[in-house]
Image (spheres, coloured by chain):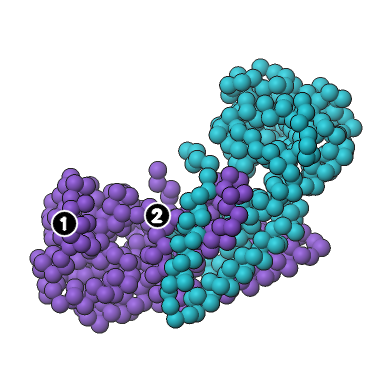
Chain colours: A cyan, B purple
């Protein structure tokens, strides 16, 4: 494993994503300091036993945690990152870099770069899971994962290279694109599927007593992401609502077609639609299923 | 394991479902005969090496395979079962029972009972997978699975008890309901999710080049069932098109609501919708994930 190009890392938010960064660093033998910033004093007390073996210092006060850091990684919900960024910018040292892991990039990249210039490199690892919290964090989460970085177009500076090297040291591969391209693509590959999984289950709530024993592995996997944190996902969907709304309109048109096919007199159009879906899916490169 | 209450079993269709029955029987030490009926002479030649260790006789001619059987299990696609049932009824012995594993029950239960009376017990194991063929069949597929049997209302005869005992000997638990209730429920818990998974991917086909590297585990699992056999699923959807069409209309209304929420000025209704979906999902009892 390459060595991470940082020595004092502050991770704001020790949930699935932030916690997995900490565990991955220690799993790789990272000997520098890791400070975890959690929501409040109660979380500090609650989490202290769990973080001990990973040698993570805990605090709920942002400013002191940032002063010494050479990398600050923001791993809270998007709207929390947007709230925290001004305080981060005030307290972080002039040589530190700041990055994040949020599933939406446009508002975060804009604010981060407005406040921190080239020292802010927005990022999004395309991995996760419906389980939340430090207990669900895994040291191999980023192994083989794709991490999207969305620096300002045309940038190719030392900060970008260091953040790239950081993720590579955790086993990830890097893709680079604009925040707009990212958010538009992720609306299709992640955000709208989450909305559908949640909405699909919400649509069954009146019949849950009759249906709850009649589901197989199909519905289980189709709606796995509907077991995710609803507040986090409402936040992501809301921050990307223009792109998600457009994708949803497109899907509604596709489903209108499907409805007409079901009401028609010939099964072949339906068969052709399904075959198209299957062929398209075969071209996708999905992350491996971790056990 | 209880002993299956049959000694000479003919399985028509040795794909994932039928093949798994054969493997489960042998895995349990079933010492009786298993005849597998496949589509044509080419399939007989192709599959002979694979079925040898499971001691399955292969044929592509229905009539002789049925003459000696005390259980005939139909495990082909729904429209094929509907085509085969008259020939099965002509050739099966007067004491044999006939059952099936199709995902839709109304037309199959009606025709089967019309032709075979109480000797036909329609069934549907609520398990499966996107992989197809005898190679994908697993001897533990029915372990802990739920099998729905849909005999004529009011029936509680020896035939039903024997078919129930058969599935229980493979590790399944039995639920009993009318074919109409089954098809209406499965439209919601299986058929429409399949349609959505296929249609969702079909909707991405024009952008597959941009999106194919930008999907995580969410889209992978959300669309896993969209890797299923499109012909089989077009068949299932078509045979159950009234119920699936109605469920799709209901979903479209729900998605219209979601679209309005995304276009609104307040994220809270969206958050409430997601929370409802998550709570509903927690009440479902899904089959375990087999490794």
Can you say whether A60 is above or below B92 in the image?
A: above
Q: Give the left or right position of residue B198, taking residue B274 as reference.
A: left
Q: Which residue is mark 1?
A: B58
The x and y percentages for residue B104 are 37, 71
Q: Which residue is mark 2?
A: B129
Which residue is drawn at the image coordinates 72% and 26% (left, top)? A162
Q: Give the left or right position of residue B50, taking residue B235 as reference.
A: left
Contact (Cβ within 8 Å) of mark 1 with mark 2: no
Mark before the other along the chain sequence, 1 or 2: 1
Q: Tell which subunit mark 1 falls on.
A: B
Front residue of B230/A231: it is B230
- For the residues beneath circles 1 and 2, the answer to whether they share a chain is yes
Q: Quadrant of the C terminus of chain B?
A: top left
For numbered disc 1, what is the local secondary structure?
Answer: strand
Mark 1 or mark 2, which is nearer to you?
1
Q: Tell which subunit mark 2 falls on.
A: B
The x and y percentages for residue A209 are 50, 67
Which residue is drawn at the image coordinates 83% and 44% (left, top)? A110
Q: Give the left or right position of residue A165, taking residue A212 as reference.
A: right
Which residue is drawn at the image coordinates 79% and 24% (left, top)? A69
Q: Quadrant of residue A179?
A: top right
Front residue of A153/B49: it is A153
Can you say whether B213 is above or below B45 in the image?
A: above
Which residue is drawn at the image coordinates 17% and 62% (left, top)? B60
């Amino acid at each position: 494993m390459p060595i991470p190009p940082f020595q004092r890392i502050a991770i704001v938010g020790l949930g699935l994503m932030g916690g997995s960064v900490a565990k991955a660093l220690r799993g790789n033998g990272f000997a520098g300091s890791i400070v975890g910033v959690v929501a409040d004093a109660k979380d500090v007390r609650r989490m202290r036993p769990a973080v001990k073996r990973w040698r993570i210092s805990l605090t709920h006060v942002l400013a002191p945690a940032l002063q010494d850091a050479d990398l600050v990684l923001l791993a809270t919900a998007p709207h929390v990152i947007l709230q925290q960024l001004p305080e981060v910018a005030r307290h972080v040292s002039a040589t530190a870099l700041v990055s994040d892991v949020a599933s939406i990039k446009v508002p975060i990249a804009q604010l981060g770069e407005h406040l921190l210039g080239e020292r802010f490199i927005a990022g999004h690892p395309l991995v996760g899971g419906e389980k939340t919290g430090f207990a669900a964090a895994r040291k191999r989460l980023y192994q083989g994962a794709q991490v999207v970085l969305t620096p300002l177009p045309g940038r190719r500076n030392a900060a970008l290279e260091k953040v790239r090297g950081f993720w590579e040291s955790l086993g990830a591969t890097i893709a680079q694109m604009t925040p707009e391209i990212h958010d538009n693509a992720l609306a299709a590959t992640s955000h709208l599927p989450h909305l559908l999984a949640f909405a699909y289950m919400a649509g069954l709530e009146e019949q849950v007593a009759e249906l709850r024993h009649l589901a197989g592995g199909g519905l289980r996997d189709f709606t796995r992401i509907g077991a995710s944190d609803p507040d986090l996902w409402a936040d992501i969907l809301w921050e990307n609502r223009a792109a998600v709304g457009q994708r949803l309109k497109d899907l509604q048109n596709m489903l209108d077609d499907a409805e007409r096919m079901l009401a028609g007199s010939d099964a072949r159009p339906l068969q052709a639609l399904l075959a198209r879906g299957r062929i398209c899916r075969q071209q996708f490169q999905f992350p491996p299923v971790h056990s």
